[in-house]
Structure formats: structure tokens, C-alpha cells
Amino acid sequence: MIKKLLKYTAAAFILATTLQVTPAFANPVTNGQIDATKEQINDFETKIQQLDNRISLAMEKSRELNESIGTQQGKIEETEAEIAKAETALENHKKVYSERLKSIQLKGNQSVVTYAELLLSSGSVSEFFNRFTAISQIIESDTELLDGLNLKEQTLIEAKEQLHTQINQLKQSQLELAAEQQQIEKDKEQIEKDLAAAQGTLQAQLAQQEAEQRALLAQQAAEQAQQQPQQQSLVTATPTFTPAPAQAPSTPAANAASSATANAVIANAKQYLGVPYVWGGSTPSGFDCSGFVSYVYRSVGISLPRTSSAQQNVGTRISLNQLQPGDLVFKGMPAYHVGIYIGGGQYIHAPQTGDVVKIAPFNPSKFSTASRVLR
């Protein structure tokens, strides 16, 4: 009984000594500081992605506005041509009316008297009515001539006002877009400065933690060297046993899509690893997040909208724990960022300005929705 107790005591002593020399790789305070800094960096990166998305949306709006300007410019040219015709017609109309006025003025104020004398001198009732009809037509012609002149002049004024309004609206929209982009870029510059400061803090914290770990490991190594003779004297009293073979942990079968289309999408996406992020970019010379996704899917014959918020509404909405390779994953509602899930807990995306197309770990807690566009 005493021998058995001695064996257990020796085993307990060795176990306690082993636990003492196991390095505690960081103290809780330093780890907490590092976690907080990493979370701050994540927040800054999210803000940058949101600003990048706003810039891309503004650029898309600017592109649409430029197309609208082109269309409006065509209409403006047509309107200007119509105005030129109207001005010519108006001038001709004025000349006719002027001639008519001259004719009336030459007759002086006697025109009405002349018309009356002409009627009274009729030889018969029938002739009277014929002359009355002719005089009425002359008077009506004068009235129509004046009304037509006024109508054409008013139409010309309205056409010029409408043209002026259209041009001003287009110019105002361009100014507003330019101001919005400038403000976004200012906000982004400040966030990038804050991000750089946070990254510097993180590097300093990691360096400090590494130095503390080295010092702790050196101290533990010295303590272990001092305790080594005691362990050697007690090892002979420790019962030996053969541990049971460890069973390999069971892992769930990978939920990889066998779809050749998904494989083609992923293979095509990987061709552009390292391509720089460019605002509004949708070609291999530079991508933003949605431009990258739409370009890659076009290679397999699938046309997607240009922006991430519009892409979010395409395909079948799925749960973030049901992802298959080739599915789209989104941040935000409406989305401000999009990437392509490639399986194995990873996704590929064009992250943000200053970065390049890359593969990154997929953390479901950072994403809002997912969509399946492959059939």
C-alpha cells in the first residue's frame, strides 16, 4: 500500500512540475489589448470598404449621368435645331405681319369706313352678303396672323427655357457628384491614417508580447534545469504504461460542389490574384469588389449587375452555414462588399483601396447574406 502511494505521489509531482514549466504564452492583459486593437483594425477596414463602395456607386452614377448627358445632348441639339427653325418661321411671320400692318397704315383710319362704304354700295342683298363674307375673311386673316405670331413667339420662349433648365440640371448633378466624391475621399484619408496608427500599435503590442514570451520561456527553462535532478530521482518510482492510441478526430465531409461551373468560376477568379483594387474597376487592369465578381462570372456566361447591392438581390438567398464553392457572400444590408466563397473556409475578393485581389479566411460573423447564382 505504501509502495503504491509512493508511485502515485511521484506521478503527481512530475505532473505538477510539467504544468509549471508549460509556457503561458501571454498574460491576459496583453492579449486583451491585442484583441481590442485587432477589432479596431477590423472596424477601420470595414469603414474603408464602405467608403470604397460609396465611391464606386458615385462613379457608377457618374457614368450613368454621362450617358444621360450624351442622350440629353442629342436632344438639346435637336431642340436647338427646332428653335432655329422656329426663329426663322417667326421672322418670316413677322415680315408678313409687318407688310400687313403697312398696308393697313397706308389706308389710315379709313379702313373701317372703306369696308362700310363697300357694303352700303352693294347693288343687291346677294352682293351685300358676298362682300360681307370677303371683308370678314380679311379681318379674320389679320387676327389669325397675329395669333400665330404670338403662339410661335411663346413656343420659342418655352423651348429656350426648357433647354436652359435641362443644361442647368445636368451641370448641378455633376457638381453634386464631384462634391460627394471629394468628401468621401477626405473621410477615407482620415480613416486610413487611423488604420495605419492602429496597425502600428498592434505591431508594437505583438513585439512586446513576443519579448515577454521569450523572457518567460528563458525563466522556465532555467527553472526546469534546476528541477531536472529531482525528476530523475523520482522517475524510477513512476509506473510506466503504454497510452492507448489516439483516434483521429472525425471531420465532417467537405461540402464542396462538384459543379464544373463552380470549379471554372474559382479557377478563373484565382487568375487575378494580385490585381490591384481600383475604384470602379471592372477589368484585369484593376477591380473593385463588385467589378471583380461580375467580371469573373461573365467568364461562365452569367451576367450580374454592376454594384454589390444589386448583386445581393440576384440568385437564391441561402444561409451562411450552407455555403458551397461559387456562392456570393456579402457584407452589409444593402451590401457594401462582395466576394466569392471558394470552400475550405475561404473566399476570394478585391478587398479595398491599397490592397489587391486575395484569398482570405471566411468568418460568417462578418457577413450579412449569401446568394447562390450557379445552377
Image (cartoon, rainbow, N blue to C red):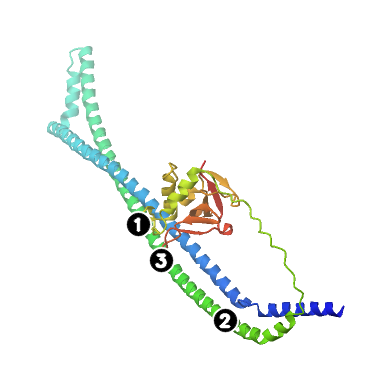
Q: Residue 166 vs residue 56: left or right?
A: left
Circle 3: residue type: Lys
Horizontal side of residue 156 vs 60, given as left or right: left
Label 2 vs label 1, nearer the camera:
2
- Ranked by sequence position, the earlier of labels 2 and 1 is 1
Task: Give the structural element (helix, strand or loop) at label 1.
Answer: helix
What residue is rendered at 44% in x and 55% in y?
289
- Closer-to-camera residue (239/139): 239
Q: Is residue 306 something one can see in this rendering? A: no
Report the residue at 16% width, 35% height from top.
Answer: 95
| Distance from the alpha carbon under mark 3 to that under mark 1 | 17 Å
Label 2 belongs to which residue?
212
Calculate the distance from the C-alpha at mark 2 to the C-alpha at mark 1.
56 Å
Q: Quarter-wise, where is residue 81 in the image?
A: top left
Mark 1 lies on residue: 175
Looking at the image, how many numbered discs can be counted on the residues? 3
